[in-house]
Amino acid sequence: MQATSNNAGLQPARYTAVAIILHWSIVVAIVAQIGIGWYMGDLGRTPLHATVEGIHISLGLTVLLLTVIRLVWRALHPPPALPTTLPPLERRAAHLVHVLFYVLLFALPLSGWVMESFGPRPIPFWGLAWPHFPGLVEVTTRPDARAIKKTIEEIHGSPMVWSMIGLMVLHVLGALKHQFDGRPVLQRMVPWMRRP
């Protein structure tokens, strides 16, 4: 059950323990994915690259699963309300950032899944075989399939990754701003921080 708000709306309730675990698991996975992705770019086509790529793919699919679970949990357990003193513009900005986060949390692993489906090899998932993306057989056999895959790779790379980094920076700066301007929010999601 969610905690209740107090202090005239200045101190919001905390997220559920499950929501907190999912949040920080996804954060750690995304930061690792960014680092692994950049590291792969320096390896060339080597046996080590294949191993690291398998980890990258497996972790990306894990992010996809965690994001689905998080959305389902969020639907069943609505998040605590933002402080009532938060200005409408900042409230809308916070909502927009969260929506964009979810868009990228789906777009990044889904585009990676599609890319890995452009070929006959099994898609690795922690030692198991993940199924190819459904409905792509006709696309992968087209004469321009290689060009389509290349386009997806380019979008999956820098544009999406830098968008994710930008959103993470905005999210952290926004949370810190609210925390120190009298509208604390960090206690909602940081496990070791207690509400006064």
Image (cartoon, helix red, strand yellow):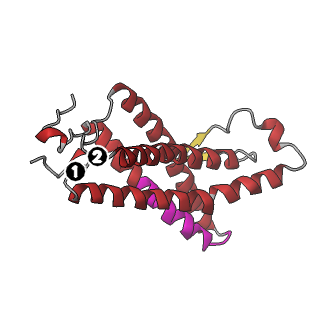
Query: Which of the two residues, 150 or 190, is positioned nearer the viewer here?
Result: 190
As drawn, the residue found furthest toward the left would be: 196
Up the image or down, 133 lies above or below 143; here it is: above
Disc 2, disc 1: CB below 8 Å? yes
> What SS does tag 2 mark?
loop
Up the image or down, 41 lies above or below 123; here it is: below
Q: Amino acid at mark 1?
A: Arg
First to last magenta residue range: 28-45
- Image quadrant assignment for residue 129: top right
The quadrant of the rendering that contains the N terminus is top left
Query: Which of the two residues, 87 or 40, is positioned nearer the viewer here?
Result: 87
Q: Amino acid at mark 2?
A: Leu
Number of labels in the image equals 2
| Residue 30, x across and y down, in percent | 46, 55
Query: Which of the two residues, 74 or 141, is positioned nearer the viewer here?
Result: 74
Residue 40 painted magenta: yes
| Residue 20, x across and y down, in percent | 29, 43
| Secondary structure predominantly adopted by residues drawn in magenta | helix
Does residue 186 appear to the left or right of 108 in the view shown?
A: left
Quickly name the residue at label 1.
183
CA gap, disc 2 to disc 1?
7 Å
Quickly name the residue at label 2.
86
- Image quadrant assignment for residue 139: top right
| Residue 18, x across and y down, in percent | 29, 37
